[in-house]
């Protein structure tokens, strides 16, 4: 009788889980395990909002396993490799099955685990599942990575063939008497109950992810292209945190939408508009895989010594708290704090404001998002912030500086989103919301709403001058 360990990572689901499927087909018994080793993920160990989601997602996964005769075993320590070696010795397992992860810290974790397991006569078997295509299939003909999305998209569409997801197992057979810890032992939940908004907004777990996908595919996808930039409208899929933790696979999403396309329940235009977003996610993972330094350093080396000011803690604090005096920025930051999520259009607005108007480093913003987002994904978070700052791959041009007032006027024309998240402005007329100076001068604003922390025109001109100078500097040579 042979035993295998199934090491759950960013694939907290039973449906469409190639690692679990392979272990069950090749061995008599399996030991499902989740390893909590945050020290190995530094400096990007899961933030507070992610830990909240992880706790509840692990509970859901454990319940699903128990319904099939299994049990989720929890171990924590400094090294995943050491924990796996100990678990092999305890259970007699000859193999460990896991999903390949493309985050640089997790890739190093895999290398260490493979070496340590090989030393005790066990093997690490990695399966693809984090992306629609293995990243080796998303490179140029010469094997080099793409640096621009459009050619990446064209190449992807040549390689990609829709395929059905794997079913969940009916029964899981486990060996007897395997020691474990409890999920609560990991200390993932906050000690001070700041998570009420997260509990009101989200239901972690694979079953919730599948329901969200079905709602989007049947009720919202046809309007997605028209309303996805309107933060007051629930027009996006809201699948990002489920994808982040692997409660749903990109293949499950792609197959569900492809089936709708074949049945003519989803139009070709609506399908492509959303599918491009899934492929953009693939592009972000490709960039992270080929350029792992971009988690902490700009992709464009001209920005290595960019003069981000270090003495504007007051602006950064106002930005974090949603008290900048610019309504749509403040609405977005308050939505983030309350729900652990922010509409993507607003993410771009608040990121542009922080980096280009405030002149504060994209890395400071990325770290704040990392701690507060339930969908904090290292590939997309790093790429998104560098795109907004103008220092990343396929980045926004240096002269693209979003005016937060005009952005609010364009994408929240009736002020519904702003009024929801900035109650001080709930009774203000729409003209005042999109022209705060006028609102203040005429006494139309609640007196508790803050004055603007900066002058938009002045800071825009400053940013243009600094960016223009950086743009014309030669890139540093690496020897």
Image: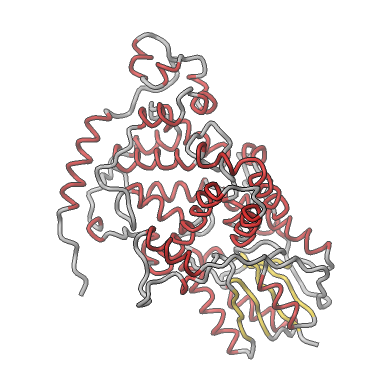
26 relative position to 269: left or right: right
Residue 118: image quadrant is bottom right
Q: Quick one: 188 or 299, which is closer to the camera?
A: 299
x and y percent of residue 411 in the render? 44, 31
> What residue sits 78% from the left and 67% below the top?
71
The picture places residue 53, in percent across and down from the top left corner, at 63, 51
Q: Quadrant of residue 291?
A: bottom left
Report the residue at 58% width, 42% height from top: 222
Q: Position of residue 52 (x, y in %)?
A: 62, 50
The quadrant of the rendering that contains the N terminus is bottom right
* 82 or 173: nearer the viewer: 173
Up the image or down, 437 lies above or below 280; here it is: above
Residue 193 in percent (x, y) is at 64, 40
Q: Is 156 on the left-hand or right-hand side of 204? A: left
- Left or right relative to 162: residue 4: right
Q: As displayed, is residue 354 above or below residue 186?
A: above
Q: Is residue 196 left or right of residue 344?
A: right
Viewer-proximal residue, 300 or 251? 251
User: For the image shown, how many numbered marks are present on the structure?
Assistant: 0
């Amino acid at each position: 009788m042979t035993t295998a360990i199934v090491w759950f990572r960013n694939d907290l689901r039973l449906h469409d889980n190639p690692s679990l499927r392979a272990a069950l087909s090749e061995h008599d018994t399996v030991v499902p395990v989740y390893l909590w080793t945050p020290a190995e993920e530094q400096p990007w160990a899961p933030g507070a909002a992610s830990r909240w989601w992880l706790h509840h997602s692990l509970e859901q996964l454990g319940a699903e396993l128990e319904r099939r005769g299994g049990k989720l075993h929890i171990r924590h320590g400094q090294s995943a490799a050491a924990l796996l070696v100990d678990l092999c010795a305890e259970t007699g397992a000859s193999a460990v099955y896991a999903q390949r992860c493309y985050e640089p810290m997790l890739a190093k974790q895999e290398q260490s685990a493979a070496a340590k397991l090989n030393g005790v006569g066990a093997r690490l078997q990695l399966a693809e599942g984090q992306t629609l295509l293995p990243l080796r299939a998303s490179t140029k003909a010469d094997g080099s990575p793409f640096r621009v999305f459009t050619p990446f998209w064209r190449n992807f569409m040549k390689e990609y063939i829709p395929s059905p997801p794997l079913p969940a197992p009916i029964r899981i057979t486990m060996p007897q008497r395997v020691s474990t810890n409890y999920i609560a032992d990991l200390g993932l939940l906050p000690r001070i109950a700041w998570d009420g908004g997260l509990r009101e907004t989200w239901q972690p777990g694979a079953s919730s992810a599948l329901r969200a996908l079905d709602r989007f595919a049947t009720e919202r996808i046809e309007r997605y292209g028209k309303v996805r930039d309107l933060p007051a409208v629930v027009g996006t899929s809201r699948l990002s945190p489920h994808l982040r933790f692997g409660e749903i696979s990109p293949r499950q999403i792609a197959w569900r939408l492809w089936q709708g396309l074949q049945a003519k329940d989803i139009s070709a235009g609506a399908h492509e508009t959303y599918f491009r977003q899934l492929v953009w996610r693939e592009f972000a993972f490709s960039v992270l895989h080929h350029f792992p330094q971009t988690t902490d350093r700009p992709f464009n080396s001209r920005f290595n010594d960019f003069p981000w000011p270090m003495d504007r803690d007051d602006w950064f604090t106002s930005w974090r708290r949603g008290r900048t005096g610019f309504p749509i920025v403040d609405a977005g930051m308050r939505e983030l704090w309350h729900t652990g999520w922010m509409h993507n259009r607003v993410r771009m607005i608040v990121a542009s404001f922080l980096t280009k108007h405030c002149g504060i480093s994209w890395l400071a913003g990325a770290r704040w998002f990392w701690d507060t987002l339930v969908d904090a994904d290292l590939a997309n978070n790093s790429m998104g912030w560098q795109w907004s700052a103008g220092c990343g791959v396929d980045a926004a041009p240096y002269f693209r500086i979003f005016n937060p007032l005009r952005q609010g006027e364009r994408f929240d024309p009736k002020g519904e989103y702003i009024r929801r998240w900035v109650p001080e402005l709930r009774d203000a007329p729409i003209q005042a919301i999109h022209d705060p100076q006028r609102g203040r001068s005429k006494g139309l604003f609640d007196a508790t709403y803050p004055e603007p922390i900066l002058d938009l025109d002045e800071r825009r001109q400053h940013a243009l001058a600094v960016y223009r100078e950086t743009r014309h500097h030669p890139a540093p040579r690496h020897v």
